[in-house]
Image (spheres, rainbow, N blue to C red):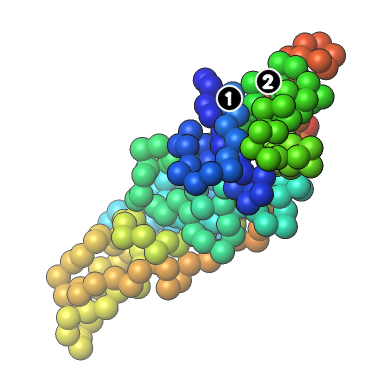
Amino acid sequence: MLHTVYINPRTSSIVIDQEPSSSGYVGLESYQYSYEVLIYAEDHEQERLFLPRTGPGTQSAGNPSERLLSCQYQITSHEDSLYNRIQDGNGLDILTQTNFKFGESLATTHDDNGVWRLVVDIYVPKLYLEQGEATFKAILGGTVAPLGYTEEDVDDIFSLVMLPQGLTTMTVIASDGTDGETRPNRCSYVYYTNMRVPEIHGESCEESYPGMLDRLPYKFFNHDSEPFVHQYVLKTVTNEGPGGSRPIEFFPPLP
């Protein structure tokens, strides 16, 4: 599917499909390619929340969809590592912000096994893909010259086009808590309506029961994992390369 990518080499800004109202942008007809990253957590052998456990008169097991209640991620190419100008994926793409809170947009990003689906889009100019770098720059230079852009500006446009490619580092931090409004039906700290604790309720994970006033949010007790880091290389193979056109390649292939 073709899209229009608008690039301003003077401000290093990139806009997809919606033509900016300000001047200085160059529109490039581009193909869209996507790859998916699946983020999930595994049960720990000593984790009581997600292994079968026995309570008074009942036997229960954790819900796999609640293993990873939120996460932070950042995908940054080597060329974009200083400023992280490209927002990769359908989240915030910064490790200091929580992404994919449990209970929000589950229909498109989350499944019953607790797997979050991250979709990353990459746009490659049609002319570059079909003709290669030299022809792309030559034709682009003639197109943008009336706008006052120089050969150096053309190089900057090409650099911005290629910004998401090359050596890429993906970092993910998983969390078993969330600051979202949804509270999964599992054990938690509670507080009561009176000074006296009501009748012992075993390991009940019910939302409420007689004598219970409320539960404390999971964000007060969440635990973040160590950062998971995976590196790969994204590369465009144009028609001028050996074997014809193979638009986007991964090295090594994503597991």
Above-or-below relation of 61 to 190: above
Residue drawn where x is 45% and y is 37% of the image = 18
Name the kind of residue labelled 2 in the image.
Answer: Leu
User: What is the number of the mark on residue 127?
Assistant: 2
Q: Position of residue 156 (x, y in %)?
A: 74, 42
Query: Would residue 155 appear left or right of 226 to someone viewing this image?
Result: right
Residue drawn where x is 53% and y is 66% of the image = 223
The residue carrying pointer 2 sits among few (fewer than 14), some (14 to 19) or many (20 or more) residues within 10 Å by Cα, namely some
- Nearest to the observer: residue 68 or residue 144: 144
Q: Position of residue 43 (x, y in %)?
A: 54, 50
C-alpha distance separating marks 2 and 1: 8 Å
Q: Are marks 2 and 1 in contact (CB under 8 Å)?
A: yes
Q: Position of residue 217 (x, y in %)?
A: 35, 69
Instruction: Work out whether mark 2 precedes mark 1 in sequence or the reverse, and give the earlier one.
Output: 1
Q: Secondary structure at mark 2?
A: helix
Above-or-below relation of 153 to 173: above
Residue drawn where x is 22% and y is 79% of the image = 192
Q: Residue furthest left?
A: 210
Query: Would residue 144 appear left or right of 194 to someone viewing this image?
Result: right
The residue carrying pointer 1 sits among few (fewer than 14), some (14 to 19) or many (20 or more) residues within 10 Å by Cα, namely some
Name the kind of residue labelled 1 in the image.
Answer: Glu
- Nearest to the observer: residue 252 or residue 87: 87
Q: Secondary structure at mark 1?
A: strand
Query: Would residue 112 appear left or right of 41 to someone viewing this image?
Result: left
Above-or-below relation of 203 to 136: below
Residue wearing tag 1: 29
User: What is the number of the mark on residue 174?
Assistant: none
- Nearest to the observer: residue 222 or residue 138: 138
Q: Is residue 207 visible?
A: yes
